[in-house]
Amino acid sequence: MGRFIRADASSFSETSWKCYMHAGQFSVRSALVFGSFADSLVACARITTSVKLESQMQKPQVVIIGSGWAGFYIAEYLDTNKYDLTVISPRRTSAYTPLLASAACGLFNFYLAEENVRAKGRKLHFIKAHAIDIDFEKRRVACVPAFAEDEALAKQSFQVPYERLILTPGCMPNTFGIPGVSQHALKLKTVSDAMALRKLLFDLLEKASLPNVPEERKKELLHVAVVGGGPTGIEVTAELYDLAKAELEDMYPEVAHFLKISIYDVAPNILSSYDRTLYEYANNKLLKRDVAVEVNTHIERVEADAFYTKEKGRVPYGMLVWATGNRNVPFIERLDVRLSQKGLKRILTDDRLRVYKSAESDQIYDDVWALGDAADVEGLSLPTTAEVAVQKAKYVVGQFNGTGAAGPFEYQQKQLVTYIGNRDGVIAGKEDKEGWTGQGAWLAWRSGSLMWTRSWRNRVMISLTWIVNAIFGKDVAKM
């Protein structure tokens, strides 16, 4: 019997022998007493499985701060067979911001304009919290729970360790310090914002429909003021105009004609990122549709039912939509990193999106990347758009997964498209090509709505909703 055991043991590899030796006294005794080696092999298999599981648990720990365009893309496509992934964000969903105005005005259901960070089959850990600081030396992220309604819980800080860190905290709407904006203006950053816009619009229409409301008050209630003449502000205006013409004139025949949309901007023209021919085209088309375009306007303060401008004084409104651009989140100013000094403060990175330590040093942090609206490649000054965020996210995923090309990040400029209402739009030229306008631009914008969402289910549902809307009209009154 002893010779039998020695003969089998000599054919083991070193690893197999170690597994056998760890199998325990019971397995050894069973082999000696009963002459059965099977028990030992079963025990060895169990230990081997345990070793494999332990190895899987030792995958590099990747932490993403933020769940916007860049953060959510990485969370969706990072190879979780290689990495243990954690996402820290105050929002459990990621909004497709170019679709929010369309959802608010009934082109499709709200849930199609966002996706959950947690999803079936998506292997990650999600922590609903605000990141408040980072210890780069100890590789820890300090956080507080993102539950403002629970004040006691929101004060209980904790730390999340990381081995690799990806910063995508995003930006926040820029109020320029104007009193009253935060309290009274609507923003359009999340699906909740879009829902609030629709609800307020129909509340205003119902108020204006009351028999005891005088005509002058009806006009004030139904004045929709959009502050910001960039693509977001113009597209909100366009969707509201289409909604008024296609649906509201039939639903509210007594008051719909009082609805007035105005655009306010401090710049000398709207859509300033476009060529002069295109922004003048957009301006003229909006004016023909009775949309007021008030450029060179400086808003000084905002109250519950009116705002005050330097040029015209008091301007009453029923709804005020704030679409003026971004400012940095306070979080990035607490970090020991290099920040841009002109315009929007952003975390500066090298051309591989790795974070610089400080303004005084050319060193970069090991295993720390930054992208999205909160970051910029030093010397490039890229725009804070979804397209830039997604291209950077694709680059980082390629580097992590080993599927991307070697070399630095290179931004590929895409053509700007803005919808201006009534199946009309403008598309900026690319390089030496001229831009174009009209229905072709509208079709390009509409098809782009499908491509922003990466879920085929959502694409099919959006397309079906468009068909139903064309036949039966938009189902916008429900909330």
Image (cartoon, grey):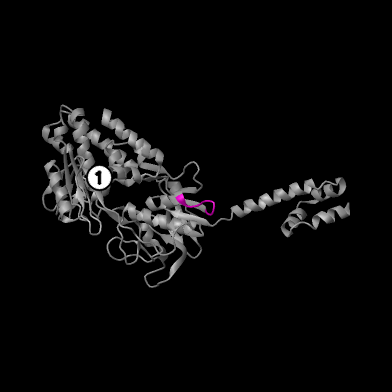
Q: In the rendering, at what x and y percent does residue 101 appear? A: 28, 42
Residue 169, above or below 471:
below
Q: What residue is at 35 percent from the left and 58 percent from the top?
A: 374
Q: In the rendering, at what x and y percent does residue 302 appear? A: 20, 48
Displayed quadrant of residue 192: top left
Q: Nearer the viewer, residue 236 or 107?
A: 107
Name, please, the residue furthest toward the top.
Answer: 211
Q: Nearer the viewer, residue 81 or 410?
A: 410
Q: How many marks?
A: 1
Prevailing SS of the magenta stretch: loop
Q: In the rendering, at what x and y percent does residue 199 appear? A: 28, 35
Residue 79, above or below 195:
below
Quadrant of the image containing the C terminus: top left
Displayed quadrant of residue 355: bottom left
Q: Nearer the viewer, residue 161 or 416?
A: 416
Residue 236 horizontal side relative to residue 388, left or right: left
Residue 329 horizontal side relative to residue 225, left or right: right
> Badge 1 local density, few (<14 within 10 Å), some, or many (20+)?
some
Q: Which residues are magenta?
A: 77-83
Element under disc 1: helix
Q: Which residue is denoted by mark 1 in the rendering?
A: 184
- Is there any visible trace of residue 478 in the rendered image? no
Q: Nearer the viewer, residue 100 or 212?
A: 100
- Is there any visible trace of residue 220 in the rendered image? yes
Q: What residue is at 48 percent from the left and 58 percent from the top?
A: 400
Residue 448 horizontal side relative to residue 168, left or right: left
Q: In the rendering, at what x and y percent does residue 263 appear? A: 17, 47
Asked if residue 217 lies in the magenta stretch, the reply is no
**Callout 1 amino acid:** His
